[in-house]
Every structure is written in C-alpha cells, then in structure tokens.
Image (cartoon, rainbow, N blue to C red):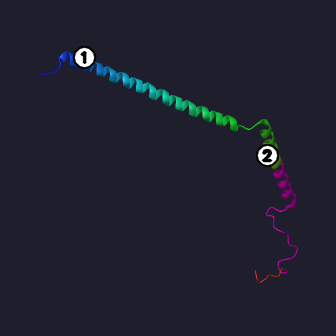
Amino acid sequence: MNLIQSNVKNYISEILTKCHEKRITIYYWVLNLSVLFIFLTGVGILLYACYKQKPTKEELRKKMIMEQNYILEQIRFYQGQMKSSSEITDLPVLSETRDQIRYDPRI
C-alpha cells in the first residue's frame, strides 16, 4: 500500500536529483572562484612586496661605490704583501750560519 502514486514519487525524485546537481554546481563554482581569488590576491601581494623591496637608483649607486672601494682596498693590500715578501715561503732570512744559532731550550 503506497501513500503516493508512483509517477509522483518519480517526479519528486527527479526534482530532488536536479536540485542536488544544481547545488553541487553552485558549490563547485563558488569554491573555484574563491580559490582563484585567494591565489590572485597572494600573487598580487607577492609582486607588490618584490616591487617595494627593489633598491632605488641612489641605493644601487652607493652599493656599487662600496663594492668598488672594497675591490680597490683588496688590490692595494695584496700589492703591499707582494712588495713586502720577497721569498715564496715568506720566512725570515737568517744571516747567521746554522752552527752559530743558539737554540733556546725553553721552546
């Protein structure tokens, strides 16, 4: 004994299925659009932060001058070392012969 007719039951089932599919489609679009919005917002924030951290022309010029000064200091330092060291090993030259050198027993 059925309280509702079979064609009404089929009709209601069909309508509920269509409503369910429509709801799933709406959820799908809302989810995809919100993920797209979050992604684009994140990329926009990242690009803006990279743009703001970019050094100005004045900062680049100062950095270049500092690097040039550092390189010149290193060149001068190594040129001074080359002039002061005449030997390859950079050991001091002893004028005394080996027999004349006194060894210190404390060492």
Q: Which residue is mark 1?
A: 11
Per the image, label 2 sits on a secondary structure element best described as helix
Q: Nearer the viewer, mark 2 or mark 1?
A: 1
Q: Is residue 38 magenta?
A: no
- Which residue appears at 32% of the width and 20% of the height? 18
Q: Residue furthest top?
A: 7
Q: Which residue is mark 2?
A: 67
Looking at the rendered structure, the kind of residue marked 1 is Tyr
- Which residue appears at 18% of the width and 19% of the height? 4
The residue carrying pointer 1 sits among few (fewer than 14), some (14 to 19) or many (20 or more) residues within 10 Å by Cα, namely: few
Looking at the rendered structure, the kind of residue marked 2 is Glu
Magenta-drawn segment: 71-100
- Does 104 appear above or below 47? below
Q: What is the quadrant of the N terminus in the image?
A: top left
Q: Percent from the top left, x then y, of residue 97?
A: 85, 77
> On the picture, is 52 further left or further right than 30?
right
Q: What is the quadrant of the C terminus in the image?
A: bottom right
> On the picture, is 2 further left or further right than 10?
left
- Which residue appears at 79% of the width and 42% of the height? 64
- Does 51 appear above or below 79? above
Which callout, 2 or 1, points at the residue further toward the start of the chain?
A: 1
> Looking at the image, which is closer to me, 58 or 16?
16
Per the image, label 1 sits on a secondary structure element best described as helix
Q: Residue furthest left?
A: 1
The residue carrying pointer 2 sits among few (fewer than 14), some (14 to 19) or many (20 or more) residues within 10 Å by Cα, namely: few
C-alpha separation, residue under disc 2 versus residue under disc 1? 81 Å
> Looking at the image, which is closer to me, 36 or 97?
36
Q: Percent from the top left, x then y, of residue 88?
A: 80, 61
Figure quadrant of residue 16: top left
> Looking at the image, which is closer to me, 82 or 53?
53
